[in-house]
């Protein structure tokens, strides 16, 4: 079972159905931007669609954050080895809306980022567009661009690894 399917089954309401994505939506985005979307992103969106999470996800993330920061308060040097907590994922951009999300560049988002999701504060979760150029379906690192601090950090090595951040 794909990680996007697991995400949907774990965090979506049982009566909620993912928003269907068709190959044409993905191809239009690729053609407009001159990129090849990561294979794991494309295959899982076509298989599952875009899920919508419930408040259960944020509650789980808050509990994880509390544990993370309790350890850091006791042992501050752990900041050197512990990863940043996962952002509070709000929703995924539909591929037809991903290009509209590029408007965040006017607010300081780096040119090389392609948003595919966003967090509860409006910060963007993105692919590295440089990794997507060249026509091959190689994986792209997933980056988090904070719309308040204007900093960018790497969250994971791929879309599939990104989804694992949100699975218990």
Image (cartoon, rainbow, N blue to C red):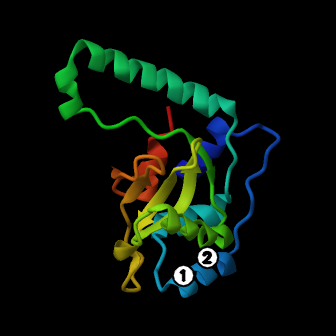
**Apparent side of residue 94 relative to residue 74 in the rendered image (left or right):** right
Helix, strand or loop under label 2: helix
Q: Is residue 155 above or below residue 35?
A: above
Identify the residue at horizontal 57%, vertical 61% (top origin): 44
Task: From the top left corner, tell me how far across and down residue 123 is, in percent.
Answer: 52, 50
Sort mark 2 into few (<14), some (14-19) or many (20+) by Cα contacts within 10 Å: some
Please tell me in which quadrant of the rendered image residue 164 appears. Answer: top left
Helix, strand or loop under label 1: helix
Task: From the top left corner, tell me how far across and down residue 156 is, in percent.
Answer: 36, 51
Identify the residue at horizontal 44%, vertical 41% (top origin): 165
Residue in the foreground of this view, choosing between 64 and 88: 88
Q: Is residue 144 above or below residue 168?
A: below
Residue 1 showing in the rendered view: no
Q: Which residue is mark 1?
A: 30
Sort mark 1 into few (<14), some (14-19) or many (20+) by Cα contacts within 10 Å: some
Measured in 3D between alpha carbons, the distance from the residue under mark 2 to the one under mark 1, in whole angstroms, is 6 Å
Residue 109 showing in the rendered view: yes
Task: From the top left corner, tell me how far across and down residue 109 is, in percent.
Answer: 44, 62
Q: In the displayed image of the protein, which residue is found farthest to the front?
A: 107
Task: From the top left corner, tell me how far across and down residue 46 is, in percent.
Answer: 64, 67
Q: In the displayed image of the protein, which residue is found farthest to the right?
A: 15
Please tell me in which quadrant of the rendered image residue 152 appears. Answer: bottom left
Residue in the foreground of this view, choosing between 77 and 20: 77
Please tell me how many numbered marks the rendered image carries: 2
Q: Which residue is mark 2?
A: 26
- Name the disc covering residue 21, or none: none
Identify the residue at horizontal 50%, vertical 61% (top origin): 107
Identify the residue at horizontal 78%, vertical 50% (top origin): 17
Labels 2 & 1 near each other (Cβ < 8 A) = yes
């Amino acid at each position: 079972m794909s990680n996007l399917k697991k995400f949907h089954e774990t965090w979506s309401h049982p009566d909620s159905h993912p928003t269907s994505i068709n190959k044409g939506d993905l191809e239009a985005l690729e053609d407009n931007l001159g990129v090849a979307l990561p294979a794991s992103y494309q295959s899982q969106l076509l298989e599952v669609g875009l899920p919508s999470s419930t408040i259960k996800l944020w509650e789980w993330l808050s509990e994880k954050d509390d544990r993370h920061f309790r350890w850091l308060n006791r042992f501050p040097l752990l900041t050197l080895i512990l990863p940043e907590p996962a952002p509070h994922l709000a929703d995924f951009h539909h591929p037809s809306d991903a290009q509209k999300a590029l408007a965040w560049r006017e607010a300081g988002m780096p040119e090389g980022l392609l948003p595919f999701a966003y967090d509860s504060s409006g910060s963007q979760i993105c692919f590295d567009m440089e990794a997507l150029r060249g026509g091959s379906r190689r994986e792209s690192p997933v980056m988090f661009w904070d719309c308040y601090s204007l900093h960018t950090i790497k969250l994971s090595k791929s879309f599939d690894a990104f989804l694992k951040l949100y699975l218990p």
